[in-house]
């Protein structure tokens, strides 16, 4: 079990994270937050790149700082901006990282082949990465995170640059892996985690906003999400009154999905709340979401 | 070891490093070959040592003189060799055929060495050590313990000079001073090797230390099991590549030098040979050192300096986090260290301390282990300077690494 206990992080006078308490057991966790909310800070502390200003992070009751190598051995991490050596092949780069991860030498090549197959890069394992597309590079990043068969897999914006087919493949891969490990996925693409995350963690203003399963959080919006069709000329005024979640032009009118917490009109049709709605409502005032 | 090798490969496969290394070796090769016009003349020393032995004695000099007289007679003269050569005008020389001219050249060359040998004792024993002592104290305003220390050093050096005279250590054949072969090898080539090594080693060290920052891979690399402890492997790799660069540069450059010049007969000659007299004074080393011993010690000294510079560059790189800025800063620091003593002439004690100067050691291999009248010619100067800067470099690297191990990677 991974426990974050009252963790804060300050950079001078700036508070990047404040009083965070979380617990993780095996399963997939989706970390949702707009840019600047503190999710990357939280992740960097989990992977030991930065230290909390106060509080502590425990793995099975022991501080991760004290565990050192034996903790990092359990981690697989895909950073938000995955760096790589352009003149290396995926195979060569993964061999280097395998050495750093302390993998047994005689099993390294077999394991590299396995993870590259998982991300469909087996055929290009000996090609220089400088010729790779953004999606291919991201898949190399996913492969390196999986290389050490980690018990804690932390992925920061893992689907950035992946096409829809690759994203679907990635979600299936994570579902298969989730049984025996903690997987934490940080993203602002709600659809990436909606169907696979056991729990959703939301951060706002450097503090924890919500942690629980997505169905429960969606239930809290029951009766507050509606759809309505309206003429184009009415839409501008309507938008000033309500938080719109989806806007679609349809055969001479606008079809609008919106949030109305306090009132209901007869012509409005109640809609089923989605996780995306929660995200848009909770972060409605954040500039990166609007 | 595997990880250290991976780190080393990052540097040694860098095109910039490989190209510079090849260019430096080529430059040294061209310089050696370009300045080797007198290499055939230098071979005469081999003939002399083969025929008369390595040591100059009155008997061997007489034998040499007799042989030269005989050689002169073969050219059809009844004069002694000295008179024959003195009477040889340019017009007469031009009238001889090519073979005769070659024979005259050979006799003339041999006679030059004979003359140097014959005059050596009077020339060498006429060095006025008391005058040198006066120069030393007049040139600076030393007082107190420094004056006592330098006076004591000078006395020891004078004793060493007298020992050289007494044991006739200076009476061994070497290339005539006018060819400046000691300077050619040490002041030119070994210094070039050392300076080029430093230029490369600083770049390589900064590259290895900052590689993850510059490739933006620190988030991936420093979260592996090895974590920030990778920095120790980077440090080892920087030292390993520095050693490799020095070996390659020295190996190829000296290889070209010794293929060009034949040193076979002078390896065992003391570096303090009276013939090795290029400028105002001959080289008077603190200890009896043969040419090959001097060469090995000079290379080891330069290697030590190069590795110390690599450690300093590593420490700087951990703070600066940019290869090229680290390189500029490190080179600027070495230049500043070199210039510092010249700004302190009014403060002899400070000047003395500033003279324990790593750049000075780097740039003066021809003066290693030599006594003399400057602060940098005290006994064990090289050793003290290296130990002092090794301490500074270890402290700098140690603090840099310690800071890196605990700081946030952002």
Image (tube, coloured by chain):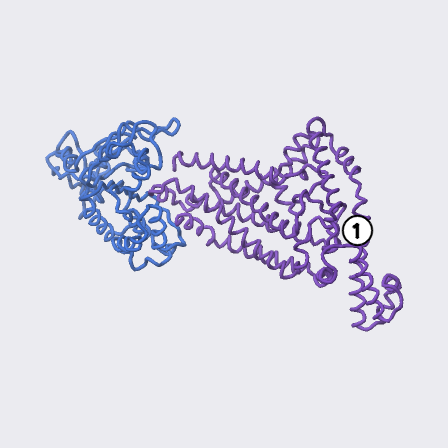
Q: Residue at image x 80%, y 41%?
A: B128
The total of numbered circles placed on residues is: 1
Q: Residues within 10 Å of mark 1 (few under 14, many from 20)?
A: some
Relative image position of residue B40 (x, y in whole percent): 71, 63
Q: Is residue A112 left or right of residue B202?
A: left
> With B74 as the anchor, is A219 left or right in this view?
left
Quadrant, the N terminus of chain A: top left
Question: Where in the figure is residue A182, as x and y percent of width and height?
Answer: 22, 40
Residue ID at (72%, 48%): B169
- Locate residue A205: give its quadrant: top left
User: Which of B14 and A196 lies nearest the eye of the viewer?
Assistant: B14
Q: Which chain is purple?
A: B
What residue occupies the far left of the structure in this picture?
Answer: A266
**Camera-side residue: B277 or A244?**
B277
Chain of the residue under label 1: B
| Image quarter in which the C terminus of chain A is found | top left
Q: Which residue is mark 1?
A: B120
Q: Residue furthest front?
A: B59
Q: Secondary structure at mark 1?
A: helix
Query: Which colour denotes chain A?
Result: blue
**Residue B118: percent from left, percent from top:** 81, 54
Left or right: where A71 falls relative to B404: left
Left or right: residue A3 compared with residue B52: left
Image vertical order of residue A167 relative to residue A274, above or below: below
Q: Position of residue B375 (x, y in %)?
A: 68, 36
């Amino acid at each position: 079990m991974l426990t974050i206990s009252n963790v804060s992080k300050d950079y001078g006078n700036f508070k990047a994270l404040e009083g965070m308490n979380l617990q993780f057991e095996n399963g997939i966790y989706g970390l949702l937050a707009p840019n600047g909310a503190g999710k990357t800070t939280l992740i960097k502390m989990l992977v030991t790149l930065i230290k909390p200003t106060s509080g502590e992070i425990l793995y099975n009751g022991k501080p991760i700082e004290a565990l050192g190598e034996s903790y990092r051995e359990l981690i697989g991490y895909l950073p938000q901006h995955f760096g790589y050596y352009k003149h290396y092949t995926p195979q060569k780069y993964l061999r280097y990282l395998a050495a750093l991860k302390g993998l047994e030498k005689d099993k390294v090549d077999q394991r590299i082949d396995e993870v590259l197959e998982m991300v469909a890069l087996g055929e290009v394992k000996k090609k220089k990465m400088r010729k790779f597309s953004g999606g291919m590079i991201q898949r190399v990043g996913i492969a390196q995170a999986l290389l050490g068969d980690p018990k804690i897999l932390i992925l920061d914006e893992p689907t950035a640059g992946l096409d829809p087919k690759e994203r679907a493949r990635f979600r299936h891969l994570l579902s298969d892996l989730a049984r025996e490990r903690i997987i934490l996925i940080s993203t602002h693409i709600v659809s990436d985690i909606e169907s696979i995350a056991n729990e959703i963690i939301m951060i706002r203003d450097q503090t924890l906003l919500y942690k629980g399963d997505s169905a429960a959080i969606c239930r809290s919006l029951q009766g507050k999400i509606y759809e309505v069709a309206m003429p184009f000329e009415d839409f501008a005024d309507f938008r000033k009154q309500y938080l719109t979640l989806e806007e679609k032009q349809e055969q001479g009118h606008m079809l609008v999905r919106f949030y109305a917490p306090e009132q209901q009109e007869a012509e409005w049709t109640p809609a089923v709340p989605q996780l995306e709605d929660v995200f848009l409502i909770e972060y409605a005032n954040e500039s990166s979401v609007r | 070891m595997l990880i250290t090798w991976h780190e080393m490969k990052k540097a040694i496969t860098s095109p910039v490093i490989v190209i510079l290394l090849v260019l430096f070796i080529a430059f040294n090769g061209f310089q050696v070959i370009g300045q080797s016009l007198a290499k055939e003349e230098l071979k005469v020393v081999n003939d002399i040592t083969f025929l008369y032995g390595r040591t100059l004695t009155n008997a061997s000099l007489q034998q040499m003189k007799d042989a030269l007289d005989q050689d002169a007679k073969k050219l059809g003269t009844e004069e002694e060799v000295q008179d024959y050569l003195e009477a040889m005008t340019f017009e007469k020389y031009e009238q001889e055929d090519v073979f005769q001219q070659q024979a005259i050249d050979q006799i003339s060359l041999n006679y030059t060495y004979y003359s140097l040998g014959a005059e050596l004792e009077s020339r060498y024993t006429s060095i006025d050590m008391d005058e040198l002592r006066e120069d030393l104290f007049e040139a600076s305003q030393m007082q107190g313990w420094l004056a006592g220390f330098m006076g004591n050093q000078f006395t020891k050096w004078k004793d060493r000079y007298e020992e050289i005279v007494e044991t006739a250590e200076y009476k061994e054949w070497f290339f005539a001073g006018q060819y400046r072969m000691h300077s050619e090898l040490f002041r030119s080539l070994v210094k070039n090797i050392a300076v080029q090594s430093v230029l490369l080693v600083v770049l390589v060290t900064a590259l290895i230390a900052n590689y993850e920052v510059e490739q933006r891979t620190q988030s991936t690399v420093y979260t592996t099991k090895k974590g920030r402890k990778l920095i120790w492997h980077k440090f080892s790799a920087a030292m390993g590549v520095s050693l490799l660069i020095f070996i390659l540069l020295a190996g190829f450059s000296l290889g070209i030098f010794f293929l060009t010049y034949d040193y076979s007969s002078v390896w065992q000659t003391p570096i303090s040979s009276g013939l090795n007299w290029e400028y105002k004074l001959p080289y008077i080393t603190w200890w009896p050192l043969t040419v090959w011993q001097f060469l090995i010690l000079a290379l080891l000294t330069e290697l030590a300096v190069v590795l110390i510079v690599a450690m300093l560059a590593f420490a700087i790189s951990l703070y600066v986090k940019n290869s090229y800025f680290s390189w500029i800063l490190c080179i600027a620091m070495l230049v500043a260290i070199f210039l510092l003593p010249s700004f302190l002439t009014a403060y002899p004690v400070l000047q003395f301390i500033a003279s324990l100067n790593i750049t000075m050691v780097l740039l003066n291999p021809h003066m290693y282990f030599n006594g003399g009248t400057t602060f940098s010619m005290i006994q064990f100067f090289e050793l003290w300077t290296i130990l002092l800067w090794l301490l500074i470099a270890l402290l700098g690297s140690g603090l840099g690494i310690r800071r890196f191990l605990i700081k946030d990677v952002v």
